[in-house]
Image (cartoon, grey):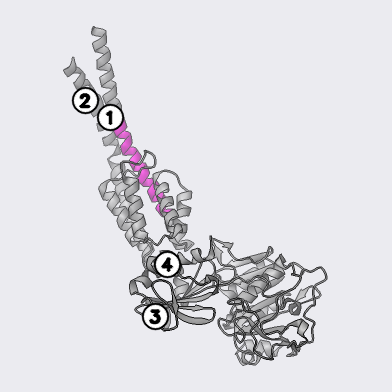
């Protein structure tokens, strides 16, 4: 009987620890996704400022050069723009963003962004394509600044967050084990 | 994709629906004019008319669909592919070329800076001019343009909307290897039946003259397509047939493009549309002195008109061009009025009774 209890305790502790590690990884993955998004915005900026590509073409090229959820988002917007069904750019941007940040999207394709980040990305799309190249440059610069701040925050708190999640997981597991025993 | 569907994609939803309901042959559509607050107007088969909500044509504006400012704005957004920043230079010049080579003319309030137009804002007037690719429309012109495997320096002179771009496009296509000749090439608009014995030709050259193998020697053609009208490139790929040995410099200023082509692509012939500025003409003079042949078009009514223009007039008087093709819309767009040699000798003149034999829409009269 004691062996059974001990096994249960170990399993609970390990599971809770694993949960903590998973949570810590989510933090890291989120930071990586924001970095990937920033890289794509740089590509987009090159396409717009250097090649003067229209948005459909610029998003398509930037999307093709990357992988992951931000690339899928860019490619979907580019596809709908190219189809020219008479929809406005911001409508397409907003719909696709809501679609890809929704919970129904499978992992890997899902843009797991915080509410504030979604709002920033929406505002970025609202001003993209408006007026001249100078305006595009400023819009992109503003969004890159916001992204840099987010990435900086995630990077700054990464170590403590990882430690905290892992420790909390293990400690929580031990606590549960003690209570259950 | 059908040409009509491709074109309709640049219109706002409501206008798209009206044009979809348009019952007549869309192939004969030449212009679609949108003016904010005014009736929807089209030019169909050289005939200006108005379109109602159910797509019916009428001669008068009564019952015609009134285009709203919102429809113009939405259409402009789609014309610019939601990226008007990418068309800054085109907007400055007053037009945007859309896929298919169609040209959308813009008018509104000009924003100037130091006396120069910086952009156009409050765009309320759009004129969508449909490009037509008429393969074979240069068939009867080609024998005048080549001799001994060499192309003459040629200038096509035409008022706006008379098919000079269409003609130049087919000349390029034929010289670049797409020139398989038909057994019975189409006649000039206004020519009478050859069997009837009353042909209006006064040319010294036989119209039936053909290269012996039925083809022209394939040449490398360099096309400077500043307004994307000749090749209608989409992401660098020509959408119009310009033959198999043509290199296209898309959206490039003509003067710079000609010099770049000469240096980098070693073309036999350089083709440019709507030359005009001093720099274009100087670059053209340079090209002519490089052993490269020129095919060019210019706005004008007659050779004498063109001879009065500065710089270009000097080139005409200096006999730098070896052939002049003068177009008009007397028998429909693309009517060849005359073909002259560089020395002014008339090789062909249309003349005669104004009978319309064949126009086939814009540019189809050749």
**Tag 3 near tag 4, CB within 8 Å:** no
Q: Secondary structure at mark 2?
A: helix
Task: Give the Cα distance between marks 2 and 1.
Answer: 9 Å
Residue A6 locus on image (x, y percent):
25, 12
Task: Give the Cα distance between marks 2 and 4.
Answer: 63 Å
- Residue B20 vs residue B172: left or right? left
Residue B16, label in figure = 4
Which picture quadrant has residue A22? top left
- Residues at marks 3 and 2, common chain? no
Give the camera-side residue of B310 and B242: B242
Q: Secondary structure at mark 3?
A: strand
User: Taking A85 as reference, is B353 above or below it?
Assistant: below
Residue B209 locus on image (x, y percent):
80, 77
User: Taking B170 as reference, is B304 above or below it?
Assistant: below
Does the magenta-highlighted stretch encompass residue B327?
no
Q: Which chain does the residue under circle 2 lie in? A: A
Task: Give the Cα distance between marks 4 and 1.
Answer: 56 Å
**On the image, numbered disc 2 is attached to which residue?**
A172
Q: Secondary structure at mark 1?
A: helix
**Tag 2 near tag 1, CB within 8 Å:** yes
**On the image, numbered disc 1 is attached to which residue?**
A20
Residue B253 locus on image (x, y percent):
56, 73
**On the image, numbered disc 3 is attached to which residue?**
B113
Q: Of helix, strand and loop, which mostly describes the magenta segment?
A: helix
């Amino acid at each position: 009987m004691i062996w059974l209890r001990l096994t249960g305790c170990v399993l609970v502790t390990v599971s809770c620890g694993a949960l903590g590690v998973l949570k810590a990884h989510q933090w890291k993955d989120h930071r990586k996704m924001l970095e990937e998004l920033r890289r794509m915005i740089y590509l987009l900026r090159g396409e717009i400022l250097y090649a003067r590509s229209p948005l459909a073409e610029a998003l398509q090229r930037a999307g093709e050069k990357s992988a992951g959820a931000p690339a899928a988002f860019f490619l979907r917007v580019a596809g709908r723009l190219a189809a020219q069904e008479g929809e406005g750019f911001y409508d397409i941007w907003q719909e696709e963003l809501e679609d890809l940040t929704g919970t129904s999207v499978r992992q890997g394709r899902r843009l797991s962004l915080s509410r504030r980040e979604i709002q920033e990305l929406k505002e970025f799309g609202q001003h993209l394509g408006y007026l001249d190249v100078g305006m595009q440059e400023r819009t992109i610069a503003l969004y890159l600044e916001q992204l840099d701040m987010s990435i900086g925050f995630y990077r700054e708190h990464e170590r403590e967050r990882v430690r905290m999640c892992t420790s909390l997981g293990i400690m929580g597991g031990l606590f549960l084990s003690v209570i259950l025993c | 994709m059908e040409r009509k569907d491709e074109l309709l994609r640049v219109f706002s939803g409501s206008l798209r629906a009206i044009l979809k309901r348009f019952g007549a042959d869309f192939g004969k559509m030449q212009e679609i004019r949108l003016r904010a607050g005014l009736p929807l107007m089209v030019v169909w088969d050289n005939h200006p008319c108005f379109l109602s909500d159910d797509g019916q044509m009428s001669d008068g504006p009564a019952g015609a669909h009134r285009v709203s400012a919102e429809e113009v704005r939405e259409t402009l957004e789609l014309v610019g592919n939601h990226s008007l920043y990418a068309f800054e230079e085109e907007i400055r010049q007053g037009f945007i070329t859309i896929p298919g080579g169609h040209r959308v003319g813009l008018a509104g309030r000009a924003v100037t800076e130091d006396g120069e137009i910086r952009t156009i804002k409050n765009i309320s007037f759009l004129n969508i001019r449909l490009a037509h690719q008429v393969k074979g429309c240069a068939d009867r012109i080609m024998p005048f343009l080549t001799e001994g495997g060499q192309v003459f320096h040629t200038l096509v002179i035409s008022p706006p909307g008379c098919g000079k771009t269409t003609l130049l496009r087919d000349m390029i296509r034929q010289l670049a290897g797409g020139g398989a000749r038909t057994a019975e090439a189409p006649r000039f608009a206004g020519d009478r039946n050859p069997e009837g014995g009353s042909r209006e030709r006064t040319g010294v050259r036989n119209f039936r003259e053909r290269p012996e193998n039925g083809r022209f020697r394939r040449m490398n053609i360099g096309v400077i397509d500043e307004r994307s009208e000749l090749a209608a490139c989409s992401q660098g790929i020509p959408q119009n047939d310009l033959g198999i040995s043509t290199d296209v410099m898309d959206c490039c200023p003509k003067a710079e493009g000609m010099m770049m082509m000469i240096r980098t692509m070693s073309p036999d012939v350089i083709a440019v549309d709507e030359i005009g500025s001093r720099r274009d003409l100087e670059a053209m003079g340079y090209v002519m002195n490089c052993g490269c042949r020129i095919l060019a078009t210019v706005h004008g009514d007659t050779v004498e008109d063109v001879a009065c223009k500065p710089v270009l007039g000097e080139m005409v008087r200096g006999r730098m061009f070896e052939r002049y093709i003068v177009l008009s819309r007397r028998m429909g767009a693309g009517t060849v009025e005359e073909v002259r040699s560089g020395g002014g000798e008339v090789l062909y003149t249309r003349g005669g009774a104004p009978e319309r034999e064949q126009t086939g829409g814009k540019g189809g009269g050749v």
